[in-house]
Image (cartoon, helix red, strand yellow):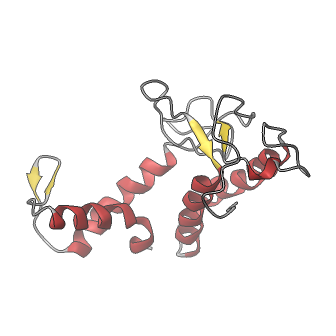
Amino acid sequence: MALNLSVIFLSVIALRLCQALPPILHGKRVTGTLDAFIASESPLALQGVLNNIGPNGSKAPGAGSGIVAASPSTSNPDYFFTWTRDSALTFKMLVDAFIAGNTGLQPQIEDYIPAQVHIQTVSNPSGGLSTGGPGEPKFNVDGTAFTGPWGRPQRDGPALR
């Protein structure tokens, strides 16, 4: 479970090693083992993920139930959207944690399923349910279509849900 929740932290550590920077966390030099670091940071990382999931995430005001906000930023840049593939990868991590024993994640997982069913049926600039709409990668966090300018069609990755 710890490794599944800590991919970001491992990436940060690898980056720091590649840049030959001393490991620093919260203004203090980090000592101890990598396993200890992962164990101490995993709960913080998990909470950070949950903070971006509606409707109760502290960084996702107005987000629908089970919707993952990519970022709380609404200006410079405005990135307060949900991305289908990124949401799927986020929930894959949560499902892995659930399978590993974190049963407290079940309500969020159960909220995600109907949210994705809904988004698949939302008509959008890429089309409707049977005319290309499920290929749309980006929606508003309230589950409505993003109709602003965007490079469509976007075919840069697998259609995860």
Q: Residue 27 location, x and y as percent?
A: 11, 46
Q: Is residue 3 left or right of residue 99?
A: left
Q: Is residue 60 left or right of residue 24?
A: right
Outermost residue toward the right in this view: 130
Instruction: Please determine whether, in this image, residue 151 is positioned above or below residue 84.
Output: above
Q: Residue 33 location, x and y as percent?
A: 17, 74
Instruction: Please determine whether, in this image, residue 21 is positioned above or below residue 127.
Output: below
Instruction: Please determine whether, in this image, residue 84 is positioned above or below residue 19.
Output: above
**Residue 144 picture quarter:** top right
Relative depth, front residue between 109 and 68: 68
Q: Residue 106 location, x and y as percent?
A: 64, 60
Q: Is residue 93 left or right of residue 159?
A: left
Please give the name of the residue rendered at 22% of the width and 73% of the height, measured from the top-left corner: 34
Q: Residue 71 location, x and y as percent?
A: 48, 39
Question: How many numbered marks does the figure carry?
Answer: 0
**Residue 6 appears anywhere in the view:** no
Q: Is residue 37 left or right of residue 136?
A: left
Please give the name of the residue rendered at 89% of the width and 49% of the height, measured from the top-left corner: 131
Please give the name of the residue rendered at 17% of the width and 66% of the height, measured from the top-left corner: 18
Relative depth, front residue between 119 and 76: 76
**Residue 3 appears anywhere in the view:** yes
Please give the name of the residue rendered at 70% of the width and 60% of the height, measured from the top-left corner: 161
Q: Quadrant of the N terminus?
A: bottom left
